Image (cartoon, helix red, strand yellow):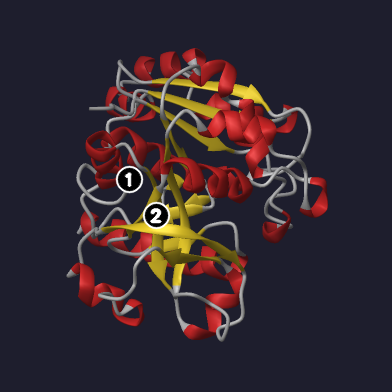
Amino acid sequence: MKNITHAVIPVAGFGTRMLPLSKSVPKELLPLGNRPAIHYVVEEAIAAGIKHIVLVGHAQKSAIENYFDINAELDNQLRHKGKDELADSLNWLPEDVTVSMIRQGKALGLGHAVLAARPIIGEHDFAVLLPDVVLDPFTTDMAADNLAFMIDAFSHDGHSQILVNEVADEDVHKYGIAKLIDTSHIDTSHIDEISGGVNASFGVAGFVEKPSLAEAPSKLAVVGRYVFDNKIFDYLADTEASVGGEIQLTDAIDALINEYGVNVTTMRGASYDAGDMRSYMQAFIYFAEQQLADEK
């Protein structure tokens, strides 16, 4: 059995979809309710059993690394004023969890960002969590659902896992869409009914990037959670830059599918795009409402 204890979170993007909010504050630190968006992503990783998180950023994203560090001066001031509970809440990372940061160097795409983590990840298999995607922590069990389910599935069958979710017809053209290996027994137009509202895993033949509805092989869109065999690094290292001069993660995934096979896992619960202004504002309202209700 393979055990996943490492995760990569790419945080080097400028967040142009979130301007002007992201002009001086990293988009990953914009709040959802009473915490930064990336806080929930890291909590999700930890709940799934991750012990070492690698942030891939650049020089202007040091504030993210600082968020996960201990501010000794602030800690001392709070405790001096008798605010021990508040001080403890700021130092919330478990003792056995490490957060490291490495710089991407050049903006050469998501594939390049993942590859940049290789010096720290080493020979370990690992997860990738895109910080723009925040999964609903109020309606799912982060210790069992989604990423945790994917890690467990990988540990048993060795197939890399990619989280997908059914999207509306009018949104298919916005995403990478999964083509399943065998759909003869699966009506992919009603995937929620197939999985019974729980995570389910299927073999995938590949992905079609932003197809029209007529050309889409399914309506299962990539969500932003991956569990990879370490071999993905070799494929990324051999992948040539394509669209926009970037190294595409999807190209390396295609190579991995051809050689070893990859599964998609259907998502349980809801997800929010915290890197899109409209979706972010909707998510902020939802998270704030949930947290205010808990305070009553």
Q: Image quadrant of residue 96?
A: top left
Q: Amino acid at mark 1?
A: Leu
Location of residue 293 with respect to 119 vertically, above or below:
below
- Residue at horizontal 28 percent and vertical 75 percent from the top: 186
Label 2 close to label 1 by CB (< 8 Å): yes
Measured from the top left, where is residue 5 in percent x and y? 34, 25
Location of residue 253 with respect to 277 vertically, above or below:
above
Location of residue 100 with respect to 39 vertically, above or below:
above
Measured from the top left, where is residue 76 in percent x and y? 42, 13
Q: Mark 1 sits on what residue?
A: 147
- Badge 2 local density, few (<14 within 10 Å), some, or many (20+)? many
Instruction: Tell me, yes or no, if residue 284 can be seen here.
Output: no
Q: Give SS at disc 1.
A: helix
Measured from the top left, where is residue 269 in percent x and y? 29, 63
Distance (Cα) linking label 2 and label 1:
8 Å
- Badge 1 local density, few (<14 within 10 Å), some, or many (20+)? many
Q: Mark 2 sits on what residue?
A: 163
- Residue at horizontal 35 percent and vertical 64 percent from the top: 270
- Residue at horizontal 28 percent and vertical 37 percent from the top: 48
Q: Earlier in the sequence, mark 2 or mark 1?
A: 1
